[in-house]
Image (cartoon, rainbow, N blue to C red):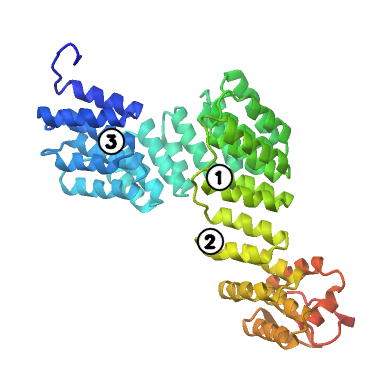
Amino acid sequence: MKSLGLKTDNFTYPFVFMCCGNLLAMKLGRLAHCEVLKNGLFADFHVGHSLITMYSRFGKMGFAREVFDEMLQRDLVSWNSMISGYAQSGCSSEAVGLFMEMRNEGFEPDERTLVSVLGACGDLGDVNLGKCVEEEYVVGKKMELNSFMGSALINMYGKCGDLVSARRIFDGMRKKDAITWNAMISGYAQNGLSDETISLFNAMKEAGVKPNNITLVSVLSACASIGALDVGKCIDEYASRRGIKHDVYVATALIDMYAKSGNLDDAYQIFESMPRKNEVSWNAMISALAFHGRAQEALTLFERMSLESSDSRPDDVTFVGVLSACVHAGLVDEGKRIFDIMSSSFGLVPKVEHYSCMVDLLSRAGCVYEAWEFIEKMPQKPDEILLGALLGACQKLKNIDVGERVMKLLLEMEPSNSGNYIISSKIYANLRRWDDSARMRQLMRQKDTTLVVRGDGRRRLCSKCESCVERLLQEINWLDEGEFLFYHGLLDRPPDTFMFIPN
């Protein structure tokens, strides 16, 4: 058009900005924005709205807000464009804040406004604001509960965990399309109600509404959670008949379902048959192989992803899966190499999950000093499970140096967990440091991890202590249960008449 010498106007640029946003052509979009300013067309409503939408699709909400703030006049579409942009870009707090500002300016929200705000409420988990929107506008203004508004309310309540309200909206809708059914099914699936998910899926089919790929992903997730392999296989067959089995999201959900149901070969077959794979597909298969102890296959698949895949690059989740494979197989050197290339070759910053895998790997291998070094480098404090694993390794190796450092952290984090005191006492006892061993037992009593003395000197243990004893007895095969308790001062006399006093 420009090469022919034709003049652009305020009708031209909105279409240009829409195309740039769809194609993510930011450089061209910025150039067109400059031309709008040069030609004095910025004051046009349609130009401003399309600019906000374009920058929102780029994820450049700062630029979008600059356009919005510089508009001399704003109509309802202007506010909706900005609120929708915030909501779709994950800036939920900003979306809600701008909605409040819009109300203060005297604008009455319409359906598009409310759908965006309800989405933001769901992302924030703000069920109270969501209820206020429903009561004030949907009920108060007697708005039609159509597919968009109904689905937005169901999604919001589902994300907030209020499934009773979500089902109330669902049951109150006279007309339900696939979007509405999907919203309710997804709500159940996201909240772990797998039986309800599958039941509603069957009701959807009985109602004559055709499930689509979004439906199948939610139901397959539910099947994976409860190991409903028969239902999963039926969905696999249905997806094949409908021609959506190779949809990247459906296929990835099938991989996850088969893997969690123990059918790893079926999962691998679907993976290999996928015409296109994304990061989630690769990660699902790598993690499945790692979980099932097939570490070498997981590592081989990781190498394939790194070298062969042009569409997908290993991300944070990929490295958690690969490092987990190294943990299960005890591949210390390989685990160190993979941890190193995460930043050097892929430019990723290791997170707590990656450090946790390395600490677990090194603890199991008896490299407790190296494990402690990783703990010191962690960007966040380690959790009690990780520290407990390292403390157990220190106990086996009789390493009091690292063990005492771990003890200190554990006792700060879990001062009432009797298991920590028992293992600490055992470490000292193994080194014949009887005073320190006794001190740990005394600390345990002071923290009220055991209860009062009964009758003939036998003590009653709290449930946490009993579970710790059971776990520790599996590791200490040279003491029976009574001897173990007497040795650690949990019995006042030899265990010839030992018994637990029931609650």
Look at label 2 and name its amino acid.
Met
Q: Residue at x 24, y 40 (%)?
A: 63
The extreme right residue here reads 496
- Corner quadrant of residue 248: top right
Tell me the number on the disc at residue 317: 1
Return the residue found at the far top: 4
What is the x, y in percent for residue 186? 51, 38
- Residue 362 in the image: above or below residue 262: below
Q: Nearer the viewer, residue 341 or 197?
A: 341
Chain-order first, disc 3 or disc 1: 3
Q: Is residue 198 visible?
A: no
Circle 2 is placed at which residue position?
378
Image: 269 above or below 501: above
Q: Which image quadrant: the N terminus?
A: top left
Please give left or right for residue 165 compared with residue 233 in the image.
left
Q: Residue at x 74, y 71 (%)?
A: 395
> 253 or 427: which is nearer to us?
427
Q: Amino acid at mark 1?
A: Val
Which residue is pictured at 33% across the width and 35% down the height?
58
Distance between mark 1 and mark 2 Cα atoms: 17 Å
